[in-house]
Image (spheres, rainbow, N blue to C red):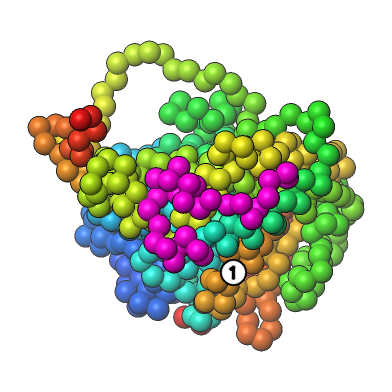
Amino acid sequence: MSLHTLTISELRAKLRCGDVSARQITQALLDRIQAVDSQLQAYLWLNPDDALAQADAIDRTSKTQPLAGIPIAIKDVLNVTGQPCTCASKILRGHTSVYDATVIRHLRAAGAILLGRTNMDEFAMGSSTENSSWGVTRNPWDLERIPGGSSGGSAAAVAGHAAIAALGSDTGGSIRQPAALTGCVGLKPTYGLVSRFGLVAFASSLDQVGPFTKTVADAALLLGVIAGHDPLDSTSVPQAVPDYREQLRAGVKGLRIGLPKEYFIAGMNREVEAAVRAAIQQLASLGAEVVEISLPHTDYAVAVYYLIATAEASANLARFDGVRYGARVRGADVLDTYGKTRGAGFGPEVKRRIILGTYALSAGYYDAYYLRAQKVRTLIRRDFEQAFQKCDVIVAPTSPTPAFKIGERVDDPLQMYLCDIFTISVNLAGNCGLSLPCGFTTQPKLPIGLQLIGKAFAEPTLLRVAHAYEQATPWHTERPAL
Amino acid sequence: MAEDPNRIDIEHVAHLARLELTDAEKTKFAAQLKDMLAYVAKLGNVDVTGVEPTAHAVPLTNVLRPDEARPSIDPALILNNAPESARGLFIMPKIVE
């Protein structure tokens, strides 16, 4: 039996009865990373001695914490004291975090081993992890293909069994889409449920931190650890965190599953559509009632997203100016130093988005672009409010296609943005969303993701439906031949 | 969208963003910005009469904390990440003549 292939729940059981130590688990993961990560390139940074020291410290405790001894990989966008944090950008080369993100503080308190830092699209802008300044991460199911993005490193690490679980961030699909494309479970929590303190901001009204896991039960456990009110994040909602595992086994009988007709579009990969439709059948046969719903403003979501997210990004990324952190390229004066530092430090996608966002906010264009986008965002929210009067959970594909080949879409930004067509509305409306495996394409064999969307703070319902489906299907037991 | 997307002044936008671009980047980004503006122009088809804008999805406003002194991160650690520092300060090119 290889420890690295086990789930959090399985490892907890072994650890508690003394079968294994935190050091053994951590060493097993370090060995696995050593064996596969030269192919995957999921990790940007790893410190084996530090990871083993964390494990030894856990082994000296009673090991009753919820994540005692569980190695977890962290997307390079979350601050961990003493570790590098570059957001896969040259502009933060050599930056060392001087504080813990709130989610990291929660992980430490829960006994998790902070294993290493995972690759991502620069500043989380992208859908393939090809926008990393440090190299391309590969899909464990086919090394010629992208793992999705922007949290591609975290997804590849979990799917490739090079981490037991991972944290990512999701602004327009950056957890759910890579989870779908690599065959793991990825959860984007309701906006305001998980603290964003210590998460390097991309689009502040959309960003959420969430888990990547091998099973739905593990996602419920990890979410319970990272969720909760944080006075350090003014958008964090002050309400109690339920035990997300409590309702897992409640089944789907009596629940209404909504099918948005706008999400089954022309141009969707045929095997993806077939797998999602089969999953809906499966949920119906488990006792759910399937109802058709409509989200009429779906067609506008990508346009709204790329105005709002880039506008917010252009403001958030103003802080990278070569003054307080990162690389500086000296110019003739202050303005010249800003321009040269940012020109040299940011990659093409980040520059592209800063330009679009700056344009959308600039004098004369604000009303026509940014303000109008915010108004259409209201209509997208209303679509969901009305839909959730007719159903408890919405079911849809996570991504219209399986993982594509490295390089296939890099020259066509708009085509790349359309990867997120099914995921971005959820961020705009502030709902929760989860992706879990629902099958594979045949030739080549690539994972397909099923997306479940819930209303704000309906994570217990989302996890309950996901767990029922997962337990009735074999997909989560499949492993890449890596 | 009343504005003509052909009238993109990429140098002005780059200046507002404090972003120095090469000539090749200016040409490329101007063309791509034009494409994206053409794509988002579809928002002009939506009737937004009387619709309030959504800035974020949480109904929280004026979230304040008590105005109390608290320990901060060690300034020396913060300055370790600075491109240039001296005597506890960030060093910058001269701003005022």
Chain identity of mark 1: A
Q: Residue at x 52, y 60 (%)?
A: B29
Decide if residue A467 is on the left or right side of residue A314.
Answer: right
Check disc 1 and report its element: helix, strand or loop: loop
Question: Is residue A187 in view from this perspective?
Answer: no
Question: Is residue B58 in view from this perspective?
Answer: yes
- Tell me the quarter of the image containing the N terminus of chain B: top right
Q: How many marks?
A: 1
Residue at far left of view: B87
Q: Residue at x 80, y 36 (%)?
A: B48
Q: Is residue A43 magenta?
A: no
Mark 1 belongs to which amino acid?
A: Asp
Does A465 appear above or below A34?
above
Does A58 appear above or below A100?
below
- Tell me the quarter of the image containing the C terminus of chain B: top left
Q: Horizontal and vertical percent for residue A437?
A: 65, 66
Q: Residue at x 63, y 82 (%)?
A: A445
Along the line of sight, the residue nearer the viewer: B5 or A443: B5
Along the line of sight, the residue nearer the viewer: A406 or A411: A411
Along the line of sight, the residue nearer the viewer: A303 or A387: A303
The segment highlighted magenta reads B1-28
Q: Horizontal and vertical percent for residue B87?
A: 10, 32
Question: Pointer 1: what residue?
Answer: A412
